[in-house]
């Protein structure tokens, strides 16, 4: 359930230095003969079911605790879902999207949702576990009021409606010279559609589920928009010949049957405007806007910076560096904090903002999902890019696991056998060992003999004392294992040390083993260890597998094998079931070392192995992490390395 692997060359040099030889008291039944596996099994190693990284391109809040996000991996799009307000995000089955830049989504509830690009529409009724291709008509916008009632805009600008969950579509609105760019349901009967003509934005309303439509207003100088446009013109101070008509795109959003917003854009002038209605679209007022992308024009190339609306009064807008908040429908604003995008600049522009309540919301950026619980006054990173490599890994019961990346100081945590990972905020420095003895309890050991222990899954940490005599020099510890908060073992000074009081005091084992070595205890009395042994003339060094049933006082040797440049590492899930790292595979036993099976892992160079009751995990020399739930014959790649 841990830890650190010692390279064979380092082990050999230390053994030669200390002259350890074979110093243990050997039981009569011990054997130093070579381990000869009774069987050889060719294991199957499956590729990763999901890439470890990705770029969120959309997020949608479904409730204060549930949100879904669309994450891109090259030309593969996946759904990420959280049901605990962003603490854990689980990724679902992927969809191949040839033109991924246009991919978008709309979910009606947690299970039923739609994803589309400009060629294909997909549907899921299993919260992203599986997807159905509905058609290839090429939609630019999709919105569903219920799992059955939907609206869509075709590439040719026609507004379509569906009453059977997207299986069949009928044309509800299509006119020459009219480009439709947005659709929005208010309820299963009332809907709005927005578009543009040469005279500017146009808004349509349907009261029969999208089958027929009536014009609400047409053109920026129409009676419904003239006063609002004049206020925008005055705010911007345009010259008479440079006034935009907003004839590029218009996006409509209604929060109630009467309260709605219209975001409009003019590509010729790079001008944006946001307008507000409180009477169902009969009259509009100017809310905010810009000219020349001073604020509100997306740096990724055209269109508005994202805005979000909840109810008739709560509004959020991205201003290029932070998200501003208004509680009075845009009459006044509270400036949001600068968002933590580091040095990535414009490439980290916010893509979509969505709120489930006046306080709970998320936004998607290029590389992360951020969440707020106070209406946008503070934002925290909720869905980071996952770890790209593995150096140490440990799993316990019920799918809980820890991971440290190569050269990393951050501890990553999973609760679902590696399907998703979240980082802890603590910076531990250089981590050299992990030990996880329950889903909530574990130990992190860093260079210089500093240890940290948690009893609540990493929310808080307590300094764990390593005696000064073991912190440096020849006596420095190489690994620590805690079976529980009291019973533990440590290798230091070429000997095994035991604690029965949580590390407050340590006692040397009565039998000194040739070390350094790896060990794994499954109970206070029963454990296994790897040591070094030199045999023959000229001298050849071997690894030696040993076990104890009395807490380390006496050891039995179960066999040896040549070092051959492989690391020294073993892991046991019980007194009978265990695995030892060898070149390109593992040695496995199910009867306490009486018989062994060789498991070949094609293309895998094992560095360390860790075992819990249900999960066997293996870190490779190049930082790959693979796990097995059947004892080692079938593996799934969790991190590609």
Image (tube, grey):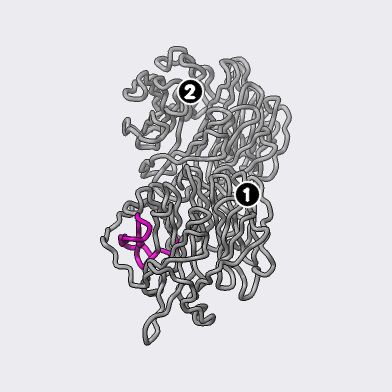
What separation in Å lies between label 1 and label 2 (alpha carbons)? 54 Å
Residue carrying label 2? 193
Marks 2 and 1: in contact by CB < 8 Å? no
Q: Is residue 561 left or right of residue 496?
A: left
The stretch drawn in magenta includes residue 326: no
Rendered residue at 61%/42% (across/down) = 293
The quarter of the picture where residue 272 lies is top right
Rendered residue at 50%/41% (across/down) = 57
Q: Where is residue 421 drawn, in percent x and y?
A: 51, 47
The stretch drawn in magenta includes residue 587: yes
Q: Where is residue 445 drawn, in percent x and y?
A: 60, 60
Report whether residue 439 is seen: yes
Depth check, front residue: 15 or 621 = 15
Residue numbers of the magenta segment: 581-608
Kindly state the secondary structure of the residue where label 1 is placed: strand
Q: Where is residue 39 drawn, in percent x and y?
A: 26, 60
Q: Earlier in the sequence, mark 1 or mark 2?
A: 2
Kindly state the secondary structure of the residue where label 2 is placed: strand
Report whether residue 622 is seen: no
* Rendered view: 618 above or below 448: above
The quarter of the picture where residue 264 lies is top right
Depth check, front residue: 277 or 418 = 418
Q: Nearer the viewer, mark 1 or mark 2?
A: 1
Query: Label 1: few (<14), some or many (≥20) within 10 Å?
Result: some
Give the position of the C terminus as an image quadrant: bottom left
Q: Where is residue 349 drawn, in percent x and y?
A: 57, 45
Residue carrying label 1? 454
Q: How many marks?
A: 2
Q: Residue furthest front?
A: 28
Rendered residue at 44%/16% (across/down) = 213
């Amino acid at each position: 359930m841990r830890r650190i692997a010692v390279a064979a060359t380092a082990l050999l040099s230390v053994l030669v230095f200390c002259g350890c030889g074979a110093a243990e008291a050997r039981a009569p039944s011990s054997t130093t003969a070579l381990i000869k596996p009774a069987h050889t099994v060719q294991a199957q190693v499956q590729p990763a079911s999901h890439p470890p990284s990705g770029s969120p391109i959309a997020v949608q809040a479904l409730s204060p605790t549930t949100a879904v996000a669309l994450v891109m991996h090259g030309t593969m799009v996946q759904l990420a879902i959280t049901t605990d307000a962003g603490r854990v995000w689980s990724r679902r089955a992927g969809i191949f999207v040839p033109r991924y830049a246009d991919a978008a989504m709309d979910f009606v509830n947690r299970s039923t949702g739609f994803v589309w690009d400009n060629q294909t529409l997909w549907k899921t009724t299993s919260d992203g576990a599986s997807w159905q291709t509905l058609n290839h008509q090429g939609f630019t916008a999709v919105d569903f009021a219920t799992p059955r009632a939907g609206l869509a805009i075709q590439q040719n600008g026609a507004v379509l409606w569906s009453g059977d969950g997207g299986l069949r579509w009928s044309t509800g609105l299509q006119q020459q010279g009219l480009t439709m760019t947005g659709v929005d349901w208010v309820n299963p009967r009332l809907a709005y559609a927005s578009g543009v003509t040469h005279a500017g934005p146009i808004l349509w309303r349907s009261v029969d589920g999208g089958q027929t439509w009536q014009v609400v207003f047409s053109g920026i100088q129409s009676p419904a928009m003239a006063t609002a446009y004049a206020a925008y013109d005055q705010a911007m101070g345009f010259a008479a010949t440079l006034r935009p008509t907003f004839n590029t795109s218009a996006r409509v959003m209604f929060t109630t049957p009467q309260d709605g917003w219209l975001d409009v854009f003019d590509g010729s002038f790079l001008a944006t405007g946001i307008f507000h209605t409180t009477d169902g679209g009969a009259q509009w007022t100017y809310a905010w806007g810009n000219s020349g992308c001073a604020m509100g024009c997306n740096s990724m190339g055209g269109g508005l910076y994202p805005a979000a609306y909840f109810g008739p009064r709560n509004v959020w807008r991205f201003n290029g560096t932070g998200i501003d908040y208004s509680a009075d429908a845009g009459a006044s604003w509270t400036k949001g904090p600068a968002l933590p995008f580091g040095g990535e600049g414009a490439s980290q522009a916010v893509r979509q903002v969505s709120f489930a309540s006046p306080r709970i919301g998320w936004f998607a950026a290029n590389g992360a999902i951020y969440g707020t619980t106070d209406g946008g006054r503070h934002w925290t990173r909720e869905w980071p890019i996952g770890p790209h490599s593995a150096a140490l890994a440990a799993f316990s019961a019920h799918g809980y696991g820890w991971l440290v990346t190569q050269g990393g100081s951050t501890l990553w945590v999973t609760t679902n056998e590696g399907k998703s990972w979240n980082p802890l905020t603590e910076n531990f420095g250089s981590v050299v060992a992990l030990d996880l003895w329950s889903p909530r309890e574990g130990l992190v050991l860093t260079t210089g003999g500093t240890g940290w222990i948690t009893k609540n899954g990493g929310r808080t940490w307590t300094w764990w004392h390593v005696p000064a005599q073991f912190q440096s020099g020849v006596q420095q510890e190489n690994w620590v294992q805690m079976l529980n908060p009291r019973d533990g073992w440590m290798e230091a000074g070429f000997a095994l040390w035991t604690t029965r009081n949580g590390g407050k005091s340590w006692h040397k084992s009565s039998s000194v083993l040739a070390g350094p070595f790896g060990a794994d205890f499954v109970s206070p009395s029963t454990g296994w260890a790897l040591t070094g042994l030199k045999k023959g003339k000229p001298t050849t060094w071997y690894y030696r597998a040993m076990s104890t049933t009395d807490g380390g006082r006496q050891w039995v040797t179960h066999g040896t094998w040549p070092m051959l440049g492989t690391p020294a590492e073993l892991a046991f899930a019980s007194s009978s079931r265990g695995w030892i790292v060898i070149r390109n595979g593992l040695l496995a036993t199910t009867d306490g070392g009486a018989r062994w099976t060789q498991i070949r892992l094609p293309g895998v160079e094992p560095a360390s192995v860790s075992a819990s009751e249900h999960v066997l995990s293996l870190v490779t020399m190049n930082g790959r992490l693979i796990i097995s739930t059947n004892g080692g014959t079938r593996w799934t790649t969790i991190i590609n390395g």
